[in-house]
Image (tube, grey):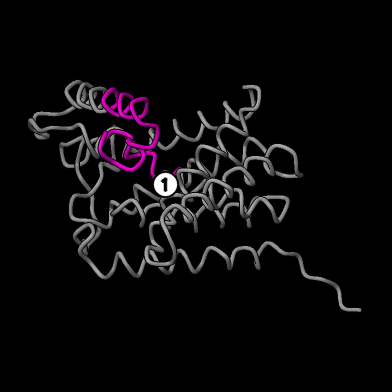
Amino acid sequence: MMGTSHAATGLLAGAAVGALAGTEVTDVVVCATVGAGAALLPDLDEPGSTVGRSLGVVSQKAAVGLRALSRRVYAATATPRDGSRDAGHRHLTHTLPAVLVFGVSAFLMAAVAPLGTVVVVFAMAALGAGTVAKSFRGWGRRRTRDTAAAILAVICATTAAFAPGGAAWLIGVTVAVGSLTHILGDWLTRSGVPLAWPVKHRGKRWWMFHSPLPFHTGRSPVEVVIRWVSLLGAPVMLWVAVPAVPAG
């Protein structure tokens, strides 16, 4: 999937987490933007990806390091049936253990580090909102959309830090769910993802699973439909989260 599609599905998934597990209506908005950003994290093994370019040299160096780590882990765990391949992208960071690492890391930062919640929410919200905004090209100037995304990230970070709700565990769960959404999105494509790793499947630890009806990334109307259904469905989670108001 393209970055905009990943961010859109993460937006909906995060909003659902906030609506179902949050304690305040504001959790829906905070979790939605966090989920949108977290849905880009698995692509941090690609320096040219949206998340790989998000912090300039810093994120690109991190992406280069993760890609090298992915290759080393593949070489150390691959079976003879896996064969030899460039396992830098769509391998280690696209596994279920990686989802847990992303989620636990976000939880620990939000729970332990001073202003950790602010840092995690702002980073994920800025990345997510900025990527979602790309779906609305033609709806105003790019600078206006980017400014709106930055303002939304500041509001979400401030809300998570000082308003009721925004628990560290909820942030961690949202990051995990967002990154899982990315992996499931790539499962829909022809390239697939190694969902079974590190367990063997048909003699391979790096078996690339994909849906029965996979599509080409960026070239399928199915991806467009998924993106817009996610974007339109996210606000519905606010309605789910709002408690019923007693009549009279």
Mark 1 neighbour density, 10 Å: few (under 14) some (14–19) many (20 or more): many
Q: Residue 66, position in %: x, y? A: 29, 26
Q: Nearer the viewer, residue 47 or 22?
A: 47
Question: In the structure shown, which secondary structural element does the residue marked by tag 1 occupy?
Answer: loop
Residue shown at 26% from the left, 22% from the top:
69
Reply yes or no: does residue 58 show up in magenta.
yes
- Using the rendered view, name the quadrant where residue 85 is placed: top left
Which residue is denoted by mark 1 in the rendering? 39
Q: Nearer the viewer, residue 117 or 192?
A: 117
The magenta stretch is: 38-66
Left or right of residue 158: residue 221 = left
Left or right of residue 190: residue 160 = right
Vertical arrangement, residue 247 with respect to residue 136, above or below: below
Q: Residue 188, position in %: x, y? A: 27, 57
Q: Residue 22, position in %: x, y? A: 67, 50
Which residue type does callout 1 highlight?
Answer: Ala
